[in-house]
Amino acid sequence: MKGNIKIVTIGGGSSYTPELIEGFIKRKDQLPIREIWLVDIEEGKEKLEIVGNLARRMVKAAGLDWEVHLTLDRREALKDADFVSTQFRVGLLEARIKDERIPLSHGVIGQETNGAGGMLKAFRTVPVILDIVEDMKELCPHAWLVNFTNPSGMVTEAVMRYGAWDKVVGLCNVPIICRKIAAGALKEKEEDLFFRFGGLNHFHWHRVWNKAGEEKTAEVIDKVYATEGGLKKAMQGMNSSGVRNIPDISFLPGQMRHLGIIPCMYHRYYYITDDMLKEELEAYEKGETRAEVVKRTEAELFELYKDPELNVKPPQLEKRGGAFYSDAACELITSIYNDKKTHMVVSTKNNGAISDLPDDVVVEVSSIITANGPVPISWGSFDSSTRGLLQLMKDMELTTIEAAVSGDYDAALQAFTLNPLVPSGRIAQTILDELLVAHKKHLPRFQAKIRELEAK
């Protein structure tokens, strides 16, 4: 019997889409899918057709009767959808290259979701996600929005705060990788460990316990994070882990021992900024920023995807980074649909889980996924080594989103000043101005300021 679920993916021409389709196929007995709609924009039409045809071949090879639709008409796709996933990049990879190279040209961290580049990505993305939400209110008012468009936490916050849409969950692959690293270090099965995560997207910490209820956090820190080269060693053999975005540089062992909780990999940008910047500047000089490498990798992937004989996700997709995003999205959708009460780490409304932050902000925390969405697991309070930095980062996110929604240049500059990875004062202003002009095509709310800057 044909299924009844309609799933829409915005940014359907993404190179990640084959993993998404694979994830749905793996869960075919739990998800009665009727149709999948892959949506993109005119500039992504060629990629949409390539990856969409691969998706159709994958579904056919799995012996399924799902309808796979390809369209540039978002509203057509959204009509009566049950789940909407978002994986789009405003400005495509060319925009990411600018986000990375312009800050680095001033000797400042350039990264997709952190620092100046991450804030510009939010400026471009937030207005688009809010437009999508307005369409959903009209066309599929009961649908769940599953977001893994970066910066995922800020995008999810914007949907709740400014879009007034609570049926949204933000996803990231980093907590999945953190779990695998800890399990490997402890030589335990991942399913035999209990994890608790708390913080923000790309800015969380976690703790871990074994089956006997013994906390193993300190042991993981000693073996992985407080040993020179420990993290690098732990990452070996995990080429599919999706952390290729971040250079493998060790944390400072003493600091990690004092911290007492396990940081995520992105914390290296904040805990060892100089080391990370040095690595990025070397890549910048060689024309090998992460964005430039990814662009070449994507070109190779789409050549593979064109093969009419290919009907499975190719292993080369692992080189793209970001593994597990799509599979996590499929599991989240399955858990909501079946009320599975799966334990996942997601971006959702705090609701008291982290007592150091307001209840109504979005945090990334361990949650139980129910038919009513995520139920956050309490983290409690952070101590003085982390609390202030967490609060600063949340306020930076909120100010960034305010600027993205309003197009207020002063708010944007304030957000830059709050961000620990952006030097304050004239340098921040210079980088902001250059990024605004460079991205003018995709920043309609900043047009008045951009015209002023160009007239100088």
Image: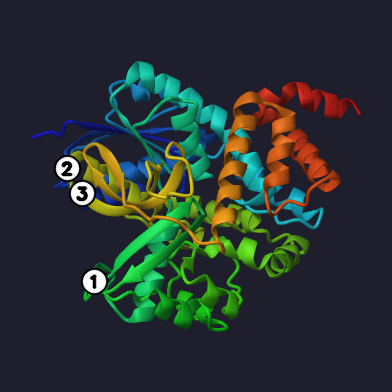
Q: Amino acid at mark 1?
A: Asp
Please tell me whether mark 1 sits on a helix, a strand or a loop: helix
Distance between the Cα atoms at labels 2 and 1? 23 Å
Residue 19 appears in the picture as rendered: no
What numbered label is drawn on residue 113? Answer: none
Above or below: residue 116 compared with residue 285: above
Distance between the Cα atoms at labels 3 and 1? 17 Å
Q: Amino acid at mark 2?
A: Asn
Residue 137 horizontal side relative to residue 154, left or right:
left
How many residues crowd around disc 1 within 10 Å: few (fewer than 14), some, or many (20 or more)? few
Q: Quadrant of the N terminus?
A: top left
Expressed as whole percent of the image width and height from the top left, the position of residue 157 reads 48, 37
What numbered label is drawn on residue 192? Answer: 1
> Residue at position x 33%, y 44% from top?
55
| Quarter location, residue 276 | bottom right
Residue 122 appears in the picture as rendered: yes
What numbered label is drawn on residue 338? Answer: 2
Q: Earlier in the sequence, mark 2 or mark 1?
A: 1
Please tell me whether mark 3 sits on a helix, a strand or a loop: loop
Q: Amino acid at mark 3?
A: Lys
Please tell me whether mark 2 sits on a helix, a strand or a loop: helix
**Residue identifier under label 3:** 341
> Residue at position x 73%, y 59% from top?
287
